[in-house]
Image: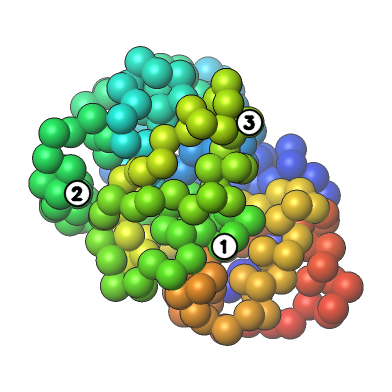
Amino acid sequence: MQITEVKHYEEMSKKASELIINRIKQMPKTVLGLATGSTPEGMYKELVQAHKNGEISFSNTTTYNLDEYIGLPSEDKNSYRFYMNDRLFHHIDIPLEQTNVPNGMASDLTKECKVYDESIRQSGGIDLQVLGIGVNGHIGFNEPGTSFETGTHVVQLAPSTIHANARFFASEEDVPKQAITMGIQSIMKSKEIILLISGAKKADAVFQLLHGEVSEIFPASILQNHQNVHLIADEAALSKVKENGMRSLR
Ligand code: PGA
């Protein structure tokens, strides 16, 4: 794992957007895997700005989002489709039909998961996946205990995830209890991964990510086995790792 330490959230966002822009310049048909949540918001702002400045076109890229709540339509401001349109897609030149977010309103969710995996496969697979991490080590909505062998599937959200995400909803009861998520296996098939982590509340998670055993109890630990992960983390997120001495990793 390649680790880049940055001072703060803004620098993390800038570095991540530069990396994405470089990859798209090298290969305009890049297939991007995208994430939602607070962490990548700054990066999306940087990408929108770069597009407005004429630095980058997304017209040939294809995107696949990691996850979506079940039961929220695309017009709901808490759905991840709404988030992606609002933060990125409506402000850049990617045709919307090249953007993919699992459909959490599908009547046949099992079929939706299969179709999503098949679509990723037909696109040639994800070239560059952007990831955040949950305080419990989840990646996408792959909660602790998820098998490393899963493709896209339906999950029950962990109480800690519902609690963490309640800040976006009127109340904790309004947070959907289920979601569709790309599986660990799908994430691990990405050719390259950028993992973004910011803030002191993630310091324990970063420590476990880098120093813990690879175990389904802490899903992000599987990333230790991926050959091309670039972790961009700020000082606060790395604080516990640094207290204990940074160890170089495979
Ligand atoms: P956050 O969520 O970026 O809102 O902290 C990350 C995650 O839960 O994966």
Q: Position of residue 14 (x, y in %)?
A: 66, 40
Q: Position of residue 201 (x, y in %)?
A: 75, 52
- Residue at image coords 25%, 61%: 151
Q: Is 190 or 177 nearer to us in this picture? A: 177
**For the residues carrying marks 3 and 1, which lies nearer the camera in this image?**
3
- Dot 3: element: helix
In this rendering, does residue 206 appear at all? yes
- Dot 1: element: loop
| Quadrant the C terminus occupies | bottom right
Question: Which of the 4 image quarters holds residue 247?
Answer: bottom right
Amino acid at dot 3: Arg
Q: Position of residue 137 (x, y in %)?
A: 57, 62
Label disc, if present, on residue 137 of the rendered structure? 1
- Dot 2: element: helix
Which comes before the other along the chain, label 3 or label 1? 1
Q: Which residue is mark 3?
A: 167
In this rendering, does residue 188 appear at all? no
Q: Is 166 or 132 nearer to us in this picture? A: 166
Q: Is mark 3 within 8 Å of ligand 1?
A: no
In the image: residue 247, left or right of residue 135 = right
Query: How is the structure coloured here?
Result: rainbow
Q: Is mark 1 within 8 Å of ligand 1?
A: no
Label disc, if present, on residue 113 of the rendered structure? 2
Report the residue that reaches farthest toward the front: 173
Contact (Cβ within 8 Å) of mark 2 with mark 1: no
Decide: few, some or many residues near mark 3? Use Cα within 10 Å; few <14, some 14-19, many ≥20: few
**For the residues carrying marks 2 and 3, which lies nearer the camera in this image?**
3
Distance Cα–Cα, label 2 vs label 3: 27 Å
